[in-house]
Image: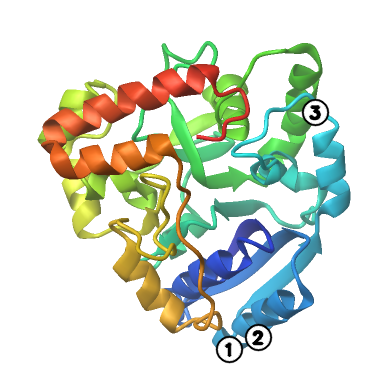
Amino acid sequence: MKELNVLYICDDTFAPIAGVSLTSLFENNSNTQISITVYLLWVGVSSRNRELFLQLAEKYGQTIHLIDAEPLMQKICSLNLSTYRGSAMTNLRLYFDLLIPDSVHRLLYLDCDTLVCAPVSELADLDLKGRTLGMILDAYGSPEAAVNITDTPYYNAGVILIDCNRWRTGNWGAKIETYLRTGDEHLSHPDQDLLNLLCRSEILRLPVRYNLQTIHRMYSNQIYFKCFPCKDYYSEQEINEAIASPAILHMIRVFGENPWNFGSHHPDEELFLRYKNISLWNSWSAGSGRDDPLLRIERILFFLLPPSIFLPLSVRAIRWIQKFDKKNNY
């Protein structure tokens, strides 16, 4: 039987969303061919949500280790590292090795806003070809606010396959900390930018089906490649095959809305609710998405303009805003 170790990170706000993602993981990997052990790093998660995580693992015959990451979070907050939308939570993934047992040799990290739609047992022993990380290219391209990464492929950190032995022996956590103590750049996607900046030679490109991002479910390939004419990206055939048979969906926020928000226009709302309804968080409900003048204008323009005009306009506006948004709130 294959063994797959999976890493999640959440606070209490994202605990129900992590619970839905875990439900999708267990639902689609429930056969006897794989044993899943989840390491969930939590900060400020209520006892009720922690209890539900353990009940979920018991329901599916899998294992969840709940690890209090508050002390590590305090250390991270003392470093010179930008936050993302007001939170330093995502930066925890850069220091996973301080909390995960040395006996864990391979780890699949998943953002809370992912849905696992198919068996992923092949990731348990996928050949990383001597690299430390397996990642999927970022569909939105390299943000202009990121430093020194415009000349190389830029990867999304929502799904990461990690060779833990190589990460430890390479002292990547220490290298990142050294960089943070000497650098003063503003990073628009802090942990993601750091992986792209420092570990670029250690990243193996994985198929797009393991991190199929929202934009590919909103726009045609023709519109997408017109806006993002990247020669090093996945081919139209690869994208089409991933859309037809995705392994992991990444539900990236659009118009300030997530699929769990009330009245959401997110393309993954229906699928998210399907897994939510069979999860232990089926009675949980989130409020409306973020609302401010810029996001209201973006939503209005989305419904007024043709996609071929709206998408490039939206991307340019977001990148311009990121240059001045030093708190990474947008």
Q: Position of residue 70 (x, y in %)?
A: 84, 53
Q: CA distance from mark 1 to mark 2?
A: 6 Å
Label 3 Cα crowd, 10 Å radius (few <14 / some 14-19 / many 20+): few
Residue at the spot of label 3: 174
Residue at (54% x, 77% y) in the render:
284
Tell me: 107 left or right of 285: right
Q: Position of residue 222 (x, y in %)?
A: 10, 33
Q: Is residue 86 above or below residue 225?
A: below
Q: Position of residue 272 (x, y in %)?
A: 38, 68
Q: Is residue 54 above or below residue 220?
A: below
Label 1 Cα crowd, 10 Å radius (few <14 / some 14-19 / many 20+): few
* Closer to the camera in the image, 319 or 173: 319
CB-based contact (under 8 Å), mark 1 and mark 2: yes
Residue at the spot of label 2: 55
Q: Using the rendered view, name the quadrant where residue 60 is placed.
A: bottom right
Q: Using the rendered view, name the quadrant where residue 62 is placed.
A: bottom right
Residue at (68% x, 28% y) in the render:
82
Return the residue found at the far front: 293
Report if residue 137 is visible in the image. no
Residue at the spot of label 1: 59
Label 2 Cα crowd, 10 Å radius (few <14 / some 14-19 / many 20+): some
Q: Give the mark nearer the N terminus: 3 vs 1.
A: 1
Q: Give the mark nearer the N terminus: 2 vs 3.
A: 2
Residue at (54% x, 25% y) in the render:
196
Closer mark to the observer between disc 2 and disc 3: 2
Q: CA distance from mark 3 to mark 1?
A: 39 Å
Tell me: 290 left or right of 57: left
Residue 93 numbered mark, or none = none
Residue at (18% x, 45% y) in the render:
303
* Closer to the camera in the image, 287 or 136: 287
